[in-house]
């Protein structure tokens, strides 16, 4: 990646996203990071500039749990930048107890699927101005834990489990990635999904056994493994997909860390993918209308 490249990384004031931002800054990218906490963001920007020796790092506030905030972020990026080379939808979240956002959506669904969908859709014009725009969607191997129709009971009013809600939301993200790739096949933009692997991040640290009932009997072992998992290592796959010449032109692929993996056949169903796309567009159009009023 040359010094003219411009990358936006969501949720990059800490955790995996911070390390992605650091590595892209080191190789010369102009980096835009997002997050909710302005104080933590200022510290992150200062640290990133110091560690990378790259001063072209900026912060834009955004709350990924709000689609309206995400749309405002997209408008600000579009107003201040003529093009975008890389978009990394890194932000995510897992909630121990069921929550509903101020916009009326089950909380896990928004940062893991609806907000990335909205942000990407709004920033596509900037990405298409790049010689080779790249979109990286950070998902999780947990998507394989969801075995039912992912578009049924989206509000999760009954039998809520944090990990199951997270697994379904990441599955929707993955299915959307596959659909988006087909829709972009005549453009210069590629889109891929990656499972970065386990990492000891603020989000992981906040987990409790209640969020993952299946792990409650081995919780001490799980925590030991999590504490040993490096967020810097987990950042490698996003950096690879964002910058490596080896993946130039590859689109619609799923990477487990840095290895491209085949997906189960049922996830390749175009009709299932279209239903996910339609859901994302329906919500996006509703929120667009509300924010334009």
Image (spheres, grey):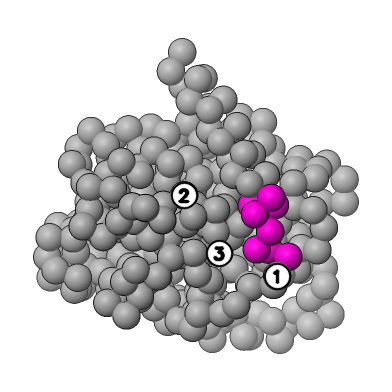
Badge 1 local density, few (<14 within 10 Å), some, or many (20+)? few
Across and down, in percent, residue 46 comes to 21, 60
The answer to whether residue 100 is visible is yes
User: Distance from label 3 to label 1 (Cα)?
Assistant: 18 Å
The answer for how far apart the CA atoms under marks 2 and 1 are is 20 Å
- The circle on residue 183 is 2
Using the rendered image of the protein, determine whether residue 14 is visible from the camera's viewpoint.
Answer: no
109 lies left or right of 55 = right
Q: Earlier in the sequence, mark 2 or mark 3?
A: 3
Return the x and y of residue 292 as percentages of the image width and height: 43, 18
Q: Residue at 67% across / 31% down in the picture?
A: 104
Viewer-side label of 2, 3: 2
Residue to which mark 1 is pinned? 265
For the view shown, which residue lies furthest in the front direction? 186
Residue 206 appears left or right of 130: right
Could you say which is closer to the camera, residue 1 or residue 248? 248
Prevalent SS, magenta region: helix
> Of residues 218 and 150, which is closer to you in this image?
150
* Earlier sequence position, callout 3 versus callout 1: 3
Vertical comparison of 143 with 222: above or below: above
Label 3, on which residue?
Answer: 139
Q: Secondary structure at mark 1?
A: helix
Cα distance, mark 2 to mark 3? Answer: 20 Å
Whether the magenta-drawn stretch holds residue 66 is answered as no
Of marks 3 and 1, the one in the foreground: 1
Figure quadrant of residue 148: bottom right
10 Å neighbourhood of mark 3: few (<14), some, or many (≥20)? many
Q: Which residues are magenta?
A: 266-273
Figure check: 240 above or below 101: below
């Amino acid at each position: 990646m040359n010094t003219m490249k411009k990358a936006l990384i969501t949720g990059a004031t800490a955790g995996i996203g911070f390390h992605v931002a650091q590595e892209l800054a080191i190789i010369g990218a102009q980096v835009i990071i997002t997050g909710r906490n302005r104080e933590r963001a200022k510290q992150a920007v200062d640290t990133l500039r110091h560690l990378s020796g790259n001063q072209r790092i900026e912060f834009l506030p955004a709350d990924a749990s709000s689609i309206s905030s995400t749309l405002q972020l997209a408008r600000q990026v579009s107003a201040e930048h003529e093009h975008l080379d890389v978009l990394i939808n890194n932000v995510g979240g897992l909630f121990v107890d069921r929550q509903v956002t101020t916009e009326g959506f089950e909380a896990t669904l928004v940062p893991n699927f609806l907000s990335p969908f909205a942000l990407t859709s709004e920033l596509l014009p900037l990405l298409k101005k790049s010689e080779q725009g790249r979109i990286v969607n950070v998902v999780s191997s947990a998507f394989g834990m969801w075995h039912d129709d992912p578009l049924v009971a989206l509000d999760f009013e009954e039998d809520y489990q944090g990990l199951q809600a997270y697994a379904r939301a990441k599955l929707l993200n993955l299915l959307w990635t596959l659909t988006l790739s087909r829709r972009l096949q005549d453009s210069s933009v590629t889109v891929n999904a990656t499972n970065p692997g386990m990492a000891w991040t603020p989000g992981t640290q906040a987990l409790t056994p209640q969020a993952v009932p299946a792990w409650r009997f081995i919780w001490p072992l799980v925590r030991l493994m999590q504490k040993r998992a490096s967020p810097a290592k987990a950042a490698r796959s996003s950096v690879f997909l964002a910058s490596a010449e080896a993946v130039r032109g590859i689109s619609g692929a799923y990477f487990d860390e840095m290895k491209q993996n085949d997906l189960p056949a049922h996830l390749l169903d175009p009709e299932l993918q279209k239903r996910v796309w339609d859901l994302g567009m329906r919500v996006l159009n509703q929120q667009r209308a509300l924010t334009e009023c």
